Image: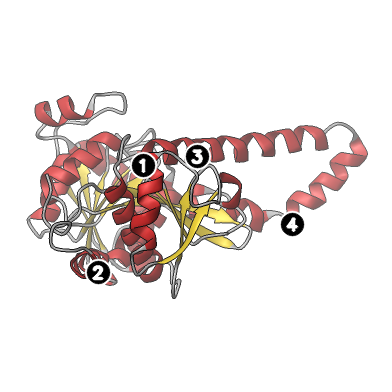
Amino acid sequence: MKIVVDAMGGDYAPIEIVRGAVDAAKQYGIEIILVGDEQKVKNELAGYDTQGFSVSVVHAGEVIEMGEPPATALRKKKDSSVVVGTKLVKQGRGDAIVSAGNTGAAMGSALLGFGRIKGIHRPAIAQILPTVKGITLLLDVGANAESDPQNLHQFAVMGSIYSNKILGVANPRVGLLNIGEEETKGNPLYLEAFKLIKESNLNFIGNIEGRDITCGAADVVVCDGFVGNVVLKFGEGLARDLMAMFKEELMKNIFVKIGAALVFSQAKGLRKRIDYAEYGGAPLLGVNGVFIICHGSSHARAITNAIRMAKECVEKNVVKSIKESICETMNGDDAGDHR
């Protein structure tokens, strides 16, 4: 298996990207193709012993920066690392791509390079979140600022497939994120989406509220990308700042400091559960290829885990499963390729 990695995408590229890619090649025994400035990437690779496993470099002379407008950048920078990497997968020279670069550019490159799965109107970014019962999958977390009811229905279908195939949930419970549990709650978008999902063959448990996400009320939580991105960023900030406030309180006197040292020495499991790096990245579901989008501030461990995620998506044929499910669950009109 060959996983293409955008070596120039992210706040810590190429140093952390290369390190994470090398670790993945060692751990998973797969071939890694690093795409980016050949000299810079090879300079980083020189610091690692890569004997016995395959890590190669494909040159790309341009980089789409994090703050660049995606549409303009994709038009102007045809030789950017994310575009070249996507082409490698499209040409069959790689099985999947991982990028921690500009999210909009990654999504645009995937749409232009892979196209959408027939029947999928819009792709969705699916993010794993920790809960008190394990994990849940939230989508969409930012691929689409606006969605229609049919989009939310398709997000539910794709999320259920991913939860089953990759996360190992036998019959994923699907919840629609709303302002109340009652079927009559929400705006027209969510009222109509509720009807569509309820009429499907999914294991739909109805509306859930924001407070229900972290208690594990559903295995898959569906919302539009605007809401999903706000939820995701709020959760990240809350986890970070609660931990900071907790530490501040524990450091107020020597006796509490001693107790804090004992607490934190036993809290490795908790820190691991709430660390996004453990989950690596978020798959862009609905495109006709495997594309894993990572957090822009990803360090090596997150990249390694994102590559693992890409490997599992390829091995378990997630794209094929979505194609088959869309054909089965959507009627003739809905299964058409709406563009």
The answer for how far apart the CA atoms under marks 2 and 1 are is: 27 Å
> Local crowd at mark 3 within 10 Å, few (<14), some, or many (≥20)?
some
For badge 2, the amino acid type reads: Ser
- Which residue in the protein does label 2 denote? 321
> Horizontal placement of 214 versus 164: left or right?
right
> Horizontal placement of 95 versus 252: left or right?
left
The answer for how far apart the CA atoms under marks 1 and 3 are is: 18 Å
> Horizontal placement of 10 versus 134: left or right?
left
| Image coords of residue 44 (percent x, y) | 31, 42
**The N terminus lies in which quarter of the figure?**
bottom left
The answer for how far apart the CA atoms under marks 3 and 4 are is: 29 Å
Are the residues tagged 4 and 2 within 8 Å (C-beta)?
A: no
Asked whether 150 or 87 is in front, the reply is 150
Asked whether 322 or 279 is in front, the reply is 322
Question: SS class of the residue under badge 1?
Answer: helix
- Which residue in the protein does label 4 denote? 266
For badge 3, the amino acid type reads: Val
Are the residues tagged 1 and 4 within 8 Å (C-beta)?
A: no
Q: Nearer the viewer, mark 1 or mark 4?
A: 1
Q: Nearer the viewer, mark 2 or mark 1?
A: 1
The answer for how far apart the CA atoms under marks 2 and 3 are is: 28 Å
- Which residue in the protein does label 3 denote? 231
Which residue is at the far bottom?
170
For badge 1, the amino acid type reads: Leu
Q: Reading the chain from its start, which is encountered first: label 4 or label 2?
A: 4
For badge 4, the amino acid type reads: Gln
Q: Reading the chain from its start, which is encountered first: label 1 or label 4?
A: 1
Q: Reading the chain from its start, which is encountered first: label 1 or label 3?
A: 1
**The C terminus lies in which quarter of the figure?**
top left
Q: Reading the chain from its start, which is encountered first: label 2 or label 3?
A: 3
Q: Mark number for residue 189?
A: 1
Q: Is residue 47 visible?
A: no
